[in-house]
Image (cartoon, rainbow, N blue to C red):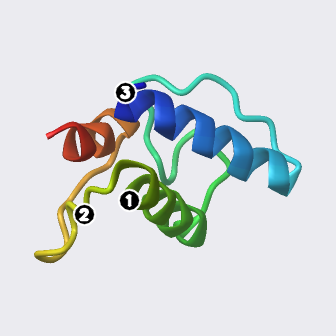
């Protein structure tokens, strides 16, 4: 399973828990201020879930700028 697949699965669960429809999550889908009904807390939850499932910690050295699902996936695929 790729990091993008994990992002799709985790976001689907997060959105479902909120009662929101997930919609399509493509590599160019913005994570905030886009079509997905997620906020910064949801995004933090997503990152923690990805770290737990992959064992990778791309933010251990500090903040890394990302905007889209694909950019976040690249951090975990690296």
Mark 1 vs mark 3: which is more N-terminal?
A: 3
Q: Position of residue 63 (x, y in %)?
A: 19, 72
Q: Is residue 34 left or right of residue 27?
A: right
- Mark 1 crowdedness (10 Å alpha carbons): few <14, some 14-19, many ≥20: some
Mark 2 vs mark 1: which is more N-terminal?
A: 1
Q: Which of the pair 35/69 is nearer the observer?
A: 69
Q: SS for tag 2?
A: loop
Q: Which residue is mark 1?
A: 51
Q: Position of residue 7 (x, y in %)?
A: 49, 39
User: Between marks 3 and 2, how big is the CA–CA gap?
Assistant: 16 Å
Q: Which residue is mark 2?
A: 57
Quadrant location, the N terminus: top left
Q: In terms of image quadrants, where is residue 42?
A: bottom right
Q: Residue at x 60, y 35 (%)?
A: 9
Mark 3 vs mark 2: which is more N-terminal?
A: 3
Q: Is residue 62 left or right of residue 11?
A: left
Disc on res. 2: 3
User: Between marks 2 and 1, how big is the CA–CA gap?
Assistant: 6 Å
Q: Position of residue 60 (x, y in %)?
A: 18, 74
Q: Which of the pair 13/54 is nearer the observer?
A: 54
Q: Which of the pair 52/19 is nearer the observer?
A: 52
């Amino acid at each position: 399973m790729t990091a993008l697949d994990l992002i799709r699965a985790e976001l689907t669960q997060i959105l479902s828990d909120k009662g929101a429809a997930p919609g399509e999550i493509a590599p160019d889908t913005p994570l905030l201020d886009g079509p997905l009904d997620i906020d910064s807390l949801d995004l933090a939850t997503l990152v923690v879930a990805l770290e737990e499932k992959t064992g990778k910690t791309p933010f251990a050295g500090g903040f890394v700028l990302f905007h889209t699902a694909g950019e976040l996936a690249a951090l975990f695929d690296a």
